Amino acid sequence: MDEILGYFDRIWSYHADSRRSDVSRMSGILEGILPDTSNWRRRVDDAARSAGIALVNRLKLTRLQVENRQGRIRTLDPVATLRRGYSVVQKVTTGDVVTKAGQVEVGDSLSITVSNGIVEATAGGTAKPKPAKRKKAGATAAGMERLL
């Protein structure tokens, strides 16, 4: 019986060694076929890092553009203009904005919008535009006379 057990033990060892050799050979073949994943992993990491940096930079640029546009909107805000002392005059009958004195006749009902509300008024007197006062030529810089 010991002989039979020894025989089976040798057969089993032979098959195990044969399979171990087959696995080792196949592993070597697969290593030669498969790509170098560490190289690909590095490339993916580099691409992800570059994309992250580009995204952060794009967000900074977009934030600056939004802040710039907010400033421009604040500057162009009609209410801000009214707060600086300007007003909007409209004819009540038509709703037209008055941009010239010749558009208003004596007795016209007017609506004057200022920063904190609306003032109702009636045009009176003569509506003649007053010419702008000119300064002396010697007091202005050369070429600036037309601007004053």
Image: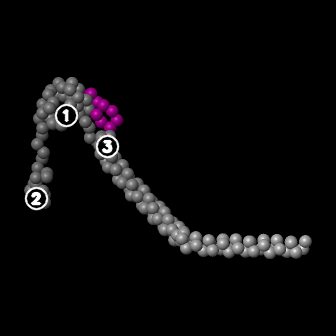
Label 3 or label 2, whichever comes before in sequence order: 3
Q: Nearer the viewer, residue 123 or 57?
A: 57
Identify the residue at image location x=12%, y=47%.
Answer: 133
Q: Amino acid at mark 3?
A: Asp
* Residue holding disc 2: 143
Q: Dots 1 and 3: beta carbons under 8 Å?
A: no
- SS at circle 3: loop
* Residue holding disc 3: 77
Q: Amino acid at mark 2?
A: Gly
Q: Is residue 79 above or below residue 68?
A: above
Residue 87 visible here: yes
Give the Cα separation between the discs numbered 2 and 1: 32 Å
Identify the residue at image location x=13%, y=52%.
Answer: 147
Left/right of residue 91 with respect to residue 71 in the rendered view: left
Give the Cα separation between the discs numbered 3 and 2: 33 Å
* Residue holding disc 1: 98
Give the residues in magenta: 113-122
Q: Nearer the viewer, residue 96 or 83?
A: 96
Q: Amino acid at mark 1?
A: Val
